[in-house]
């Protein structure tokens, strides 16, 4: 069975600084997808970034980038130039290749607070 | 603005009431999902509909009854709920339920409180 672990329940960062959220996972699969979702107080879950396990290059989306270490089964999220609007719960998620999207496995989340 | 619309945003109901949650999307997605989310916890999958057919039911109690009248609409009928059912109910949709090329789009959720 796959598991996703986020070891930081809460984090804070000053506006304009950089913060890294940790995520590790456990799987015997070789092909899979990893995601970071953001859930602000408005409640909507928003996809931040996605990584295919067969791609060695780390995914980036503007100020958001990941450090994907397949051998270590680590998938951390780096937020650069943090903004107040980045304040949210961040969930790391795993899905095996060819599986149903209903089998997204979420971590417990990290609450990020960006302080002015 | 979210492309997945959920109504109502808030619902308070007694344990004997019958109510329905509604979810609508017009992105042409053929997979739709219901999740339950308790405070400070990740979403928990309840149901998956693929091409308007129920494909996954995660052993959800029968007091929750999903319905997919057409490809754009997803309902969750509620009856005889318990206080522990109070939670945020999220709807999501994706192009299809297989593969991750088109990720899930979530609505803003319905905050449900059972008295």
Image: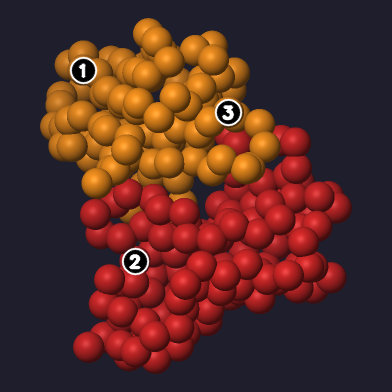
Mark toward the viewer: 3 or 1: 3
Residue A27 % position (x, y): 79, 54
Cα–Cα gap, marks 2 and 1: 30 Å
Looking at the image, is A71 positioned above or below residue B12? below
Classify mark 2: residues with Cα within 10 Å, few (<14), some (14-19) or many (20+).
many
Q: Quadrant of the C terminus of chain B?
A: top left
Chain orange in the figure, letter: B
Which label is found at residue A88? 2
Residue B19 in view here: yes
When the figure is inspected, residue B94 is found, relative to residue A74, above or below; the finding is above
Q: Is A66 displayed left or right of A42 in the figure?
A: right
Residue annotated with mark 1: B19
Tell me residue A44's x, y (percent): 32, 49
Tell me, yes or no, whether the two marked residues, 3 and 1, touch with CB atoms within 8 Å: no
Question: Which residue is at a point 51% across and 25% down the rendered structure image?
Answer: B31
Mark before the other along the chain sequence, 3 or 1: 1
Q: Is residue A37 left or right of residue A59?
A: left
Label 2 to label 3, Cα distance in Å?
Answer: 28 Å
Instruction: Check disc 2 and report its element: helix, strand or loop.
Output: strand
- The residue carrying mark 3 is B96
**Along the line of sight, the residue nearer the viewer: A95 or B105:** B105
Residue B12, how many percent across, how many down?
14, 32
> Which residue is drawn at the image coordinates 31% and 79% (left, top)?
A83
Instruction: Determine the chain carrying the residue at label 1.
Output: B
Chain label for disc 3: B
* Colour of the chain lettered A: red
Query: Are tags 2 and 3 found on a single chain?
Result: no
Q: Can residue B57 be seen by looking at this rendering? A: no
Q: Residue at x 45, y 83 (%)?
A: A80
In this rendering, the answer to whether A37 lies above or below B57 is: below
Which secondary structure lies at badge 1?
strand
């Amino acid at each position: 069975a796959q598991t996703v672990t986020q070891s930081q329940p809460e984090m804070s960062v000053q506006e304009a600084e950089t913060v890294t959220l940790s995520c590790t996972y456990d799987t015997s699969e070789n092909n899979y997808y990893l995601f970071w979702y953001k859930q602000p107080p408005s409640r909507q879950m928003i996809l931040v970034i996605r990584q295919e396990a067969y791609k060695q290059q780390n995914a980036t989306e503007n100020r958001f980038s990941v450090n994907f270490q397949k051998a270590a089964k680590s998938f951390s999220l780096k937020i650069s130039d943090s903004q107040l609007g980045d304040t949210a719960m961040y969930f790391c998620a795993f899905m095996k290749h060819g599986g149903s999207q209903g089998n997204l496995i979420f971590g417990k989340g990290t609450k990020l607070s960006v302080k002015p | 603005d979210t492309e997945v619309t959920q109504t109502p945003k808030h619902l308070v109901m007694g344990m004997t009431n019958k109510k329905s949650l509604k979810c609508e999307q017009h992105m042409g997605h053929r997979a739709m999902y219901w999740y339950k989310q308790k405070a400070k916890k990740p979403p928990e999958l309840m149901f998956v509909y693929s091409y308007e057919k129920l494909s996954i039911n995660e052993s959800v109690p029968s007091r929750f009854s999903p319905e997919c009248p057409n490809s754009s609409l997803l309902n969750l009928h509620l009856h005889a709920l318990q206080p522990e059912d109070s939670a945020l109910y999220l709807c999501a949709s994706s192009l299809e339920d297989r593969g991750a090329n088109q990720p899930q789009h979530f609505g803003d959720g319905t905050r449900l409180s059972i008295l």
